[in-house]
C-alpha cells in the first residue's frame, strides 16, 4: 500500500514527544485540564474528568480520530482547542505522508536505477566477452593466415630448390659416373706408362734416355698416379654431395614417412661442411639407428639446415660448431651449438618472429627460425634457444620417436 | 482499488489528477475546494511548493453519505508534473480508482502532453492498473490563453476522436470547466463503483445522487 493510502492512527500523529507540549499549551488556552482519547477510548494525555464534561470530536479528513475531553462550563474554548489540534494533526499527517512517499519514491527510483545498472553491467559484460572472443578469433585467423603464408612460401621455395637439386643431381650423376670410371681406367693406364718408363731407363738408346730425363718422365708417371687418386677422391665427394642434396630436398617425400633422423642430420652436416671456411670446425655426433621419427623429411631437413646455417654464420671465419643427437626416453634430442657471437635478449625474444633478421638487407629473410619452429611444432616437437651475447648459441630440438 | 471497510461503513475512493508540469492540476483542486459542491468537504492539503510547483502531492478529501448510511469518501490527489518526480507519481497513482488527465492547451506543450500521457499509461501498468477499464477523463486546460498560442478545440477533438474517454475543456484559473470535468469523471466512476459495490441496490445511491452529492447540482459551467 502506498504511503498516501495509509491511515494514520492518532498515536502516530501525536507522537510521545509532542504530547506533553501540546497538553500544557491546550490546558493553558482552555483554562481547564484536557484529556485526549483515541477512538478506542485510550488516553493519550490527561485523565477523564469525574462528573459532567464535554467530548469534542477531533477530525481528520472528514472522520473523527479521537476526542478532546474536559470538564468546563461552556464548550467554546474546548471546540477552538480541538480545531487547533485538527490543524496540527493535518500538518502531521501531511508531513508523514510526504516523508513516506519520499522514501517510497527514492526507493523505487533507486530500484529502477539498480535494475538499469544491473542491465548495463550485464550488457557490458556480454560486450566484453564478445570483444574478447572477437579479438581471439581475429588473432587466431591472423596466425593461421601467417602460418599458411609461410608454409606456402617455404614449400614453394622448397619445391623449387628440390626440383633444382634433383635436376642438378641427375645431370651431375651421369658425368661424374663416367668421369670416375674413366679416372679408374686412366689409373690402370698409368701402370703401363710406369712400365714403359722402366723400359726406357734401361734402354741402350742414349737419345731416348736423354729425352726421358729432359721430360722428367719418372716424376710425371709417379705424380700422375697421385693426381688421379686425388681426382677419384674428388669425384667421390661430388657424388656424395649430390646424393646428400637429393636426400635433403626429398621432393618425392611429400607424405609423412618413417625415417632415421640421425642419417638425415649427417647428410645435412655433410652439405654444410662442403662450404665451410677453413677456420671453422664442424663435429657431428649422432646415435646410430635409434632415432626413428615419423614426419616430413624435407621439412625437418630444412629446419635442421636453417639452424645449422645460422650457427655457421654466427662463428664467421673462426670457431666450432657441434651437432649432437641422442635418444632420451621417447624423444630425440638434437642440440646444435656454436661458440659464435650469440644473441642479445631482444634478438632472442624476437628470433622466431617471421621476417625478423639482423642481417643485411638481402642476406637473410628472417624466416629461417620461423620455418624451423613451424616444422618442429608440426611434428609435435619443441624448440628452444639458449644464447647470450659473446657466449654462443645453443638450439635444442625435441621430437617424439616412433618405437618399432 | 477502492477501499471498502464494511464494519466502519466506509468506502474510500481515490481520484488522481495527472498531467504535465504546470498544466493546472493543483489549480483544479483549489477550485473544487473553493466552490460549493460536495456534501462533506475536508480541508485541502497542499504541500509546500517552490514557484507553485507541487513537490509531493495535493490532497482534497470530500465525501457523501448514501441513504444506507455508507460513507463514501473521495480523496482527490494531484501528482507533481515535473518529469523528475516519477517515483512520487507512481506511488500516488497506485490504487487509483479514477484519473483526470489535465493537459495544457498551449501549442508548445503538445509534446509534453503526449509524454505525460505515455507516462500515465506506463505507470498505470507498473502499479497494476487495468488502463483499458480505468475511469478516465481528458481535460484540456488553459483555454483562456490567447487564441494564437492555443491549439484549437477542433484540432484537439480531431486528435482524440478515436479515444474512448470524455474530452473536456477548461480554464481552471477562472474556474470554468473544473466542475464539469469532475462531474464527468464521477459519472464514469459511478459505473465502476456500482459494478463492484452495488451502490444502487445495496446503498440506494443512484448515479445522479452520487454526482450531485459530490459535485453539487446546478453547476453553471459548460464542458464538452
Ligand atoms: N492562464 C491560465 N493559467 C492557469 C490555468 N490553470 C493554472 N494556471 C496557472 O498555471 C500555473 C501552474 O498551475 P498549477 O495548478 O500549479 O499547475 P500544476 O499542474 O499543479 O503543476 P505541477 O504541480 O508543477 O505539476 C499557475 O501559475 C496557475 O495559476 C488556466 O486555466 N489558465
Ligand atoms: N646461432 C645464432 N647465433 C647468433 N644469432 C643468431 C643465431 N641464429 C639466429 N640468430 C639471430 O636470429 C635472427 C633470425 O634468424 P633467422 O630466423 O634464421 O633469420 P635470418 O638468418 O634470415 O636472419 C638472425 O638474424 C640472427 O640475428
Ligand atoms: Mg637464418
Ligand atoms: Mg501542482
Image (cartoon, grey):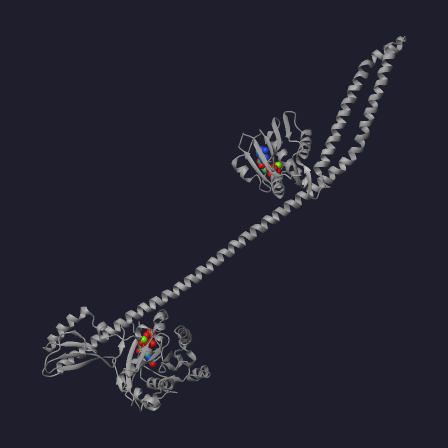
Residue A329 percent across, percent down from the top left: 59, 36
Residue at (53%, 34%) from the top-left corner?
A: A344
Would residue A208 appear left or right of A339 to someone viewing this image?
right
Of the 4 image quadrants, the one containing the C terminus of chain A is: top right
Residue A351 visible in the current orientation: yes
Residue A358 appears in the rendering = no
Left or right, A180 with respect to B29, comes to right
Residue A387 or residue B26, whichever sits in front: A387
Taking the image in four quarters, ligand 3 sits in the one at top right
Question: Residue B214's spot in the image, x, y percent?
Answer: 30, 86
The quarter of the displayed image where residue A347 is located: top right
Measured as percent of width and height from the top left, residue A295 is found at 66, 41
Q: Residue at x 20, y 75 (%)?
A: A88
Name the image quarter holding residue A281. Answer: top right
Q: Residue at 61% across / 47% down in the picture?
A: A146
Residue B89 placement (x, y as % from top left): 35, 73
Location of residue A68 (image quadrant): bottom left
Amino acid at each position: 500500500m502506498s504511503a498516501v493510502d495509509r491511515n494514520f492512527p492518532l498515536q502516530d500523529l501525536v507522537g510521545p514527544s509532542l504530547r506533553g507540549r501540546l497538553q500544557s499549551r491546550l490546558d493553558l488556552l482552555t483554562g481547564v485540564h484536557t484529556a485526549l482519547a483515541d477512538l478506542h477510548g485510550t488516553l493519550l494525555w490527561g485523565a477523564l474528568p469525574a462528573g459532567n464534561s464535554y467530548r469534542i470530536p477531533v477530525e481528520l479528513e472528514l472522520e473523527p480520530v479521537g476526542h478532546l475531553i474536559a470538564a468546563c462550563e461552556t464548550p467554546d474554548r474546548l471546540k477552538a482547542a480541538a480545531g487547533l489540534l485538527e490543524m496540527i494533526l493535518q500538518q502531521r499527517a501531511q508531513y508523514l505522508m510526504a516523508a513516506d512517499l519520499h522514501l517510497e519514491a527514492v526507493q523505487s527510483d533507486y530500484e529502477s536505477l539498480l535494475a538499469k545498472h544491473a542491465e548495463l553491467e550485464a550488457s557490458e559484460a556480454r560486450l566484453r566477452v564478445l570483444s574478447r572472443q572477437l579479438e581471439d578469433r581475429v588473432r587466431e585467423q591472423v596466425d593461421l593466415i601467417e602460418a599458411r603464408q609461410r608454409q606456402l612460401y617455404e614449400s614453394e621455395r622448397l619445391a623449387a630448390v628440390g626440383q633444382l637439386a634433383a635436376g642438378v643431381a641427375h645431370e651431375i650423376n651421369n658425368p661424374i659416373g663416367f668421369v670416375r670410371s674413366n679416372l679408374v681406367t686412366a689409373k690402370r693406364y698409368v701402370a703401363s706408362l710406369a712400365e714403359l718408363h722402366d723400359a726406357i731407363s734401361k734402354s741402350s738408346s742414349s737419345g731416348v734416355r736423354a729425352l726421358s730425363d729432359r721430360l722428367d718422365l719418372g716424376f710425371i708417371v709417379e705424380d700422375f698416379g697421385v693426381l688421379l687418386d686425388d681426382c677419384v677422391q674428388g669425384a667421390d665427394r661430388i657424388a656424395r654431395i649430390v646424393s646428400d642434396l637429393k636426400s635433403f630436398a626429398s621432393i618425392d617425400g611429400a607424405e609423412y614417412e618413417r625415417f632415421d633422423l640421425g642419417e638425415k642430420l649427417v647428410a645435412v652436416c655433410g652439405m654444410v661442411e662442403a662450404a665451410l671456411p677453413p677456420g671453422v670446425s664442424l663435429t657431428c655426433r649422432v646415435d646410430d639407428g635409434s632415432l626413428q621419427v615419423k614426419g616430413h623429411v624435407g621439412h625437418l631437413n630444412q629446419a635442421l639446415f636453417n639452424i645449422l646455417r645460422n650457427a655457421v654464420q654466427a662463428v664467421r671465419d673462426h670457431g666450432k660448431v657441434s651437432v649432437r643427437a641422442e635418444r632420451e626416453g621417447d624423444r630425440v634430442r638434437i642440440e646444435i651449438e656454436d661458440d659464435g657471437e650469440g644473441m642479445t635478449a631482444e634478438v632472442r625474444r624476437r628470433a622466431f618472429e617471421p621476417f625478423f633478421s639482423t642481417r643485411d638487407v638481402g642476406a637473410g629473410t628472417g624466416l629461417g627460425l620461423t620455418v624451423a619452429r613451424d616444422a618442429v611444432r608440426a611434428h609435435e616437437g619443441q624448440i628452444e634457444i639458449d644464447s647470450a651475447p659473446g657466449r654462443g648459441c645453443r638450439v635444442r630440438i625435441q621430437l617424439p620417436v616412433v618405437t618399432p | 482499488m477502492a477501499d471498502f471497510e464494511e464494519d466502519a461503513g466506509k468506502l474510500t475512493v481515490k481520484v488522481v489528477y495527472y498531467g504535465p508540469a504546470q498544466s493546472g492540476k493543483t489549480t483544479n483542486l483549489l477550485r473544487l475546494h473553493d466552490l460549493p459542491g460536495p456534501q462533506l468537504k475536508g480541508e485541502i492539503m497542499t504541500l509546500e511548493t517552490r514557484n507553485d510547483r507541487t513537490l509531493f502531492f495535493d490532497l482534497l478529501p470530500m465525501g457523501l453519505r448514501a441513504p444506507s448510511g455508507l460513507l463514501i469518501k473521495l480523496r482527490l490527489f494531484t501528482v507533481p508534473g515535473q518529469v523528475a518526480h516519477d517515483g512520487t507519481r507512481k506511488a500516488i497513482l497506485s490504487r487509483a480508482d479514477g484519473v483526470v488527465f489535465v493537459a495544457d492547451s498551449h501549442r508548445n506543450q503538445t509534446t509534453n502532453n503526449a509524454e505525460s500521457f505515455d507516462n500515465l499509461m506506463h505507470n498505470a501498468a507498473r502499479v497494476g492498473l487495468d488502463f483499458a477499464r480505468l475511469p478516465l477523463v481528458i481535460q484540456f486546460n488553459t483555454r483562456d490563453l490567447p487564441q494564437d498560442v492555443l491549439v484549437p478545440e477542433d484540432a484537439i477533438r480531431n486528435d482524440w476522436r478515436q479515444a474512448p474517454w470524455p474530452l473536456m475543456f477548461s480554464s481552471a484559473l477562472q474556474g470554468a470547466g473544473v466542475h464539469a470535468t469532475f462531474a464527468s469523471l464521477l459519472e464514469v466512476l459511478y459505473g465502476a463503483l456500482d459494478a463492484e459495490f452495488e451502490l444502487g441496490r445495496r446503498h440506494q445511491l443512484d448515479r445522479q445522487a452520487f454526482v450531485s452529492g459530490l459535485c453539487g447540482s446546478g453547476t453553471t459551467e459548460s464542458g464538452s
